[in-house]
Amino acid sequence: MKAILSIALAATAILSPCTAFTIPSRTTIRPDVSRHMKQQQHDSHDDDHAHHHHHLELTRRSAVSILTALPLASVLASSSINPLPAMAENKGKIVVLGGAGWVGAHVSNLLTQRGYTVVSISRSSSETQIERTKSILGTTIPSVEYVSLDAGSATIEELGGVMKDATCVISCVGIAPGSPNVKDGNGLVNSRIANAAKSVGVGKFVYVGVASSLANGPAKFLLGDYFKGKDTAEKSITKEFGIENSLIIKPAIVAGGTPGEIRPPGPPGVKAVDVDALAKVVVAGATTTLGVGGLNGSIDGNDAIVAASLL
């Protein structure tokens, strides 16, 4: 009560000389202040103190009248009341294909931290995606919606239905070299994803491909179908979205991997790019405004990715 009266006295001193003072149309009063006032009123119902209670009630009303005439910032600055936390802004929906994989989990996590609604699509069940994400990050991402859908066999309409209203689609989908159906798993599947995204009006597409230095090097003789699949995906994405509305990020080797997953070794002498740096660039490409300094086209090679992550 003393704190309220102190604020009231301070308010009187402020309001007296302010001839041009404008009372805000709406003022928020902290719920805990209101509860405190009501509790004091409830505790003062003793008939032997009726006159004292009446005096206190008038004093409270006077204090509240003055408080409501002040901007909220002035009230908070004059008391020990802590401001209410600001509500996080929802910046829009982004769909991540492979959002529970090694790169995709880091991308999904970073997007949610920046206020985006994330939908992860994978062939795996929602439960498996959650478990895999926890194994990668050490924690789950409760705000992510995990959808079980096989991009290789689902219809374009089914894929598009999940992507509807998204501002961007990110594909981290890929089949490792040496796996069955590696060409279509990298090429045809990503072509279908790009087609579905375009069909529902998604504005931008980001794809994690492979560095040209590897695709055009000696490895192409051993992993030809893998690189052909990646090349098909890149061409399809560029065809659907153009250079202006797409970003193709092309790492050579990405450091680390999902626990328990067997990954083929990279070429000798090629330094791996940190997954956090790669995730930063993917998110930057997905969230920057198109045509206004936004990332588009391609970022080819680990050195270019690290440089872009520092921008």
Image (spheres, rainbow, N blue to C red):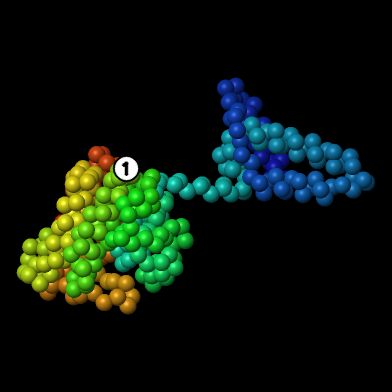
**Which element carries disc 1, helix, strand or loop?**
loop
> Which image quadrant for residue 257?
bottom left
> Which image quadrant for residue 202?
top left
Residue located at (89% from left, 42% from top): 50
| Spot occupied by residue 27 in the image (x, y as percentages of width and height) | 61, 36
Residue located at (15% from left, 58% from top): 231
Query: In terms of depth relative to the viewer, which is nearer, 244 or 289?
Result: 244
| Spot occupied by residue 20 in the image (x, y as percentages of width and height) | 57, 22
Q: Is residue 159 left or right of residue 40?
A: left
Whether residue 110 is visible, yes or no, is: no
Q: Which residue position is annotated with label 1?
A: 201
> Count the marks: how many?
1
How packed is label 1: few (under 14 Cα within 10 Å), some, or many (20 or more)?
some
Residue located at (22% from left, 46% from top): 240
| Spot occupied by residue 195 in the image (x, y as percentages of width and height) | 26, 49
Query: In terms of depth relative to the viewer, which is nearer, 122 or 71?
Result: 122
Whether residue 103 is visible, yes or no, is: yes
Quadrant location, the N terminus:
top right
Q: Is residue 147 left or right of residue 275?
A: right
